[in-house]
């Protein structure tokens, strides 16, 4: 839960919204976050959770990091934390 | 005053080779100089490939006191300028020295010097840096040292427009000779950003490829950095003829535009305007352009936008243009890249040999023009254009014509 809330906070800050306005099902596009914004969000996520996110802006689909919705991002981040801890 | 401008000397130094001839031959052989990079802390980078100059021994070319003043980007520019001036056969007497200038491009300037010295004071905790840090890192260091090495006392400055730096620089040099502001201009560009800080900054943008530079290919996944320099001698035609100089090509046109749109995403409209206007400036028609050295970075966005821009600028004439991105071989040399790429345009108009785009496995349907794939092609070309499109939406396109 903590991860999910933190992701919402990061996205809200990027989108100039409050965390309550960030729906689980929203896409980054729904939130008005453009391609440069995505790169900033990923940087913020890496810093917050001390993880490395495999993401290539040239080919987001092939990056093995699902950014299709807020929920998907949370799930992907939780998985990376599990993989990269310890 | 409208003078004709010709190229009477060329020099180059990059991962493909130590002279202009070596670089051009490597391009025509489809040599890919991209590989694992080697410098301190490279292991902490997520992207470790680049077109790095290997086996370079600065001690063999520069004295200890020269090296104290020359960042690698200055060293590379000096090496290339020396070759270009030697080929031109020019010696600058007192009168000609006043009519000879230097304009070079660079995106990073002495970035390695900054990187090393920040490390010294912040990471190593030292309270003292070498006394020449400032004259070593300044953007105009390479232009100034080239002017000193050859005694060029005319207009001298550095242009910094990211990836378009050397095309903008050569455009300035061209316009200066054409307008009568100088008889001779030593021009091109150099960059050397293959160090930990230089690559780490690029990693952040998430546009570098971890595994190779594949322009126009369906499998392309980003750009790959390179380093080096190329320098040319641009000379007023009658001056060159009067002294019996060998003329490599004519610089016929130049145009520059701004997208005024986005700081990183290129616009086809801005690029198309620059290409079309450069050909008009050269007094040519689109169907006379036989070769395009593309910007071709191998990012997802650039290559398809560039192909769309070619179609917008030239309509059906774009179908008749052979296109290649030599970045697939020498990497993206940033502020020096347009200069290194001009070598392939000179080879195209002078010798009718077209350098390939290597690593092209299967062409992206969105890049459906005549890409010279993997092996060089022989085909006489009357005129060629060289594209450079920088972050910041700055476009600079040079048109070369076979000299006759």
Image: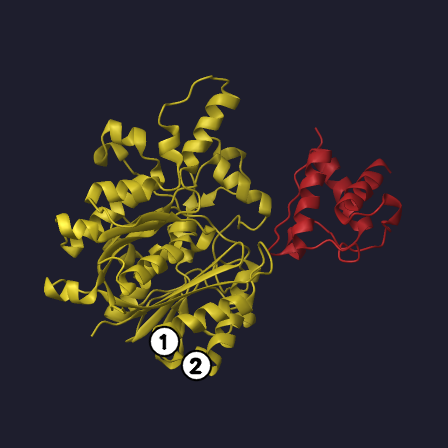
Q: Are marks 2 and 1 on the same chain?
A: yes
Residue B289: which numbered mark, if any? 1
Label 2: few (<14), some or many (≥20) within 10 Å?
some
Q: CA distance from mark 2 to mark 1?
A: 9 Å
The red chain is: A
For residue A16, say whether it is visible: yes
Whether residue B273 sits left or right of residue B105 in the image: it is: right
Compared with residue B56, is residue B119 higher up or lower down, i.e. above or below?
above
Whether residue B364 sits left or right of residue B97 in the image: it is: right
Compared with residue B9, is residue B349 higher up or lower down, i.e. above or below?
below
Corner quadrant of residue B371: bottom left
Whether residue B184 sits left or right of residue B344 in the image: it is: left
Where does label 2 land, which residue? B317
Of residues B221 and B317, the one drawn nearer to the viewer in this rendering: B317
Q: Secondary structure at mark 1?
A: strand
Q: Verify CB contact (< 8 Å) between mark 2 and mark 1.
A: yes
Q: Position of residue B1 (x, y in %)?
A: 27, 68
């Amino acid at each position: 839960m903590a991860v999910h809330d933190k992701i919402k906070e990061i996205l809200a800050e990027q989108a100039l919204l409050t965390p309550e306005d960030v729906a689980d099902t929203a896409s980054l596009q729904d939130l008005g976050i453009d391609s440069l914004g995505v790169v900033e969000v990923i940087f913020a996520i890496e810093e917050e959770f001390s993880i490395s996110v495999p993401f290539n802006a040239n080919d987001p689909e092939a990056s093995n990091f699902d950014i299709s919705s807020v929920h998907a991002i949370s799930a992907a981040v939780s998985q990376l934390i599990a993989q990269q801890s310890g | 005053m409208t003078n004709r401008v010709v190229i009477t000397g060329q020099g180059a130094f990059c991962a493909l080779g130590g002279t202009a001839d070596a670089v051009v031959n490597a391009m025509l052989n489809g040599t890919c100089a991209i590989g694992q990079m080697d410098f301190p802390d490279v292991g902490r980078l997520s992207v470790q490939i680049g077109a790095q100059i290997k086996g370079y021994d600065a001690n063999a070319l520069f004295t200890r006191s020269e090296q104290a003043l020359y960042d690698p980007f200055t060293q590379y520019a000096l090496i290339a300028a020396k070759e270009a001036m030697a080929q031109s056969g020019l010696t600058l007497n007192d009168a000609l020295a006043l009519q000879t200038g230097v304009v070079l491009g660079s995106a990073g300037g002495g970035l390695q010097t900054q990187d090393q010295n920040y490390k010294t004071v912040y990471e190593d905790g030292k309270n003292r840096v070498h006394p020449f840090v400032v004259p070593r890192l300044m953007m105009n260091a390479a232009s100034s040292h080239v002017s000193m090495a050859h005694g060029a006392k005319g207009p001298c400055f550095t242009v910094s427009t990211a990836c378009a730096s050397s095309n903008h620089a050569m455009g300035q040099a061209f316009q200066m000779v054409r307008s009568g502001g100088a008889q001779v201009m030593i021009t091109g560009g150099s960059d050397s950003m293959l160090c930990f800080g230089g690559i780490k900054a690029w990693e952040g943008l998430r546009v570098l490829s971890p595994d190779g530079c594949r322009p126009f290919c369906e499998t392309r996944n980003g750009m790959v950095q390179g380093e080096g320099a190329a320098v040319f001698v641009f000379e007023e035609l009658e001056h060159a003829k009067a002294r019996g100089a060998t003329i490599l090509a004519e610089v016929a046109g130049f145009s520059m535009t701004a997208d005024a749109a986005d700081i990183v995403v290129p616009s086809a409209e801005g690029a198309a305007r620059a290409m079309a206007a450069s050909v008009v400036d050269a007094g040519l028609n689109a169907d006379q352009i036989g070769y395009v050295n593309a910007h071709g970075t191998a990012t997802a966005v650039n290559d398809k936008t560039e192909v769309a821009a070619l179609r917008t600028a030239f309509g059906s004439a774009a179908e008749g243009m052979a296109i290649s991105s030599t970045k697939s071989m020498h990497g993206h040399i940033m502020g020096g890249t347009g200069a290194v790429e001009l070598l392939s345009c000179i080879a195209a108009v002078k010798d009718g040999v077209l350098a390939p785009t290597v690593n092209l496995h299967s062409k992206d349907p969105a890049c459906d023009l005549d890409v010279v794939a993997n092996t060089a092609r022989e085909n006489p070309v009357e005129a060629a254009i060289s594209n450079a499109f920088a972050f910041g939406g700055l476009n600079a396109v040079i048109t070369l014509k076979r000299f006759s």
